[in-house]
């Protein structure tokens, strides 16, 4: 149980950091996570929760589309999950699916980098 909570906390922080970086790159007219660290943490929490709870179900249900597209359909799934987090958490603003897909790429890269750094520290 402790390992699961630690894993979720790391994902939460990495996701919040990824959203913050994506908002800085894309600009407030396309993606906004608010002005305080609390709103960034809240947006990261909701996106990490959505990724933990709903993403596995979507991946299993869309497995044929993922295989046929050689994995590119995962970008659509990531974008849809960011739009769902936008719908659940009011301070998070995402303009459209295209912006959500780009934000998903950025968040995924940040999560990958954080994971690699933490693995190297072990």
Image (cartoon, rainbow, N blue to C red):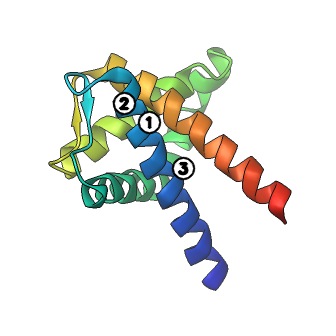
Q: Position of residue 14 (x, y in %)?
A: 53, 52
User: What residue would you read off at disc 2?
Assistant: 24
SS state under label 2: helix
User: What residue would you read off at disc 3?
Assistant: 56
Q: Position of residue 12 (x, y in %)?
A: 47, 59
How far apart are the two marked residues, 2 and 3, measured between alpha carbons? 29 Å
Query: Marks 1 and 2: in contact by CB < 8 Å?
Result: yes
Q: Position of residue 20 (x, y in %)?
A: 39, 41
Q: Position of residue 3 (x, y in %)?
A: 66, 78
Q: Quadrant of residue 5?
A: bottom right
How far apart are the two marked residues, 3 and 1, measured between alpha carbons? 25 Å
Query: Could you classify mark 3 by the number of other residues whose Cα lies within 10 Å: few (under 14), some (14-19), or many (20 or more)?
Result: few
Image quarter (top left, top right, bottom left or bottom right) of the N terminus? bottom right
User: What residue would you read off at disc 1?
Assistant: 21
Compared with residue 110, is residue 73 higher up or lower down, i.e. above or below?
above
Kindly identify the residue that appears in the image at 35 percent across and 58 percent down.
41
Q: Is 9 placed left or right of 43 in the picture?
A: right
Compared with residue 104, is residue 41 higher up or lower down, i.e. above or below?
below
């Amino acid at each position: 149980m402790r390992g699961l909570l630690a894993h979720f906390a790391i994902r939460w922080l990495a996701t919040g950091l990824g959203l913050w970086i994506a908002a800085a790159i894309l600009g407030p007219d396309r993606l906004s996570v608010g002005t305080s660290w609390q709103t960034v943490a809240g947006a990261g929490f909701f996106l990490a929760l959505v990724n933990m709870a709903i993403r596995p179900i979507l991946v299993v249900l869309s497995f044929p589309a993922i295989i046929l597209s050689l994995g590119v359909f995962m970008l659509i799934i990531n974008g849809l999950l960011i739009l769902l987090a936008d719908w659940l958490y009011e301070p998070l603003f995402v303009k459209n699916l295209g912006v959500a897909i780009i934000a998903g790429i950025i968040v995924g890269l940040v999560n990958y980098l954080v994971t690699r750094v933490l693995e190297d520290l072990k």
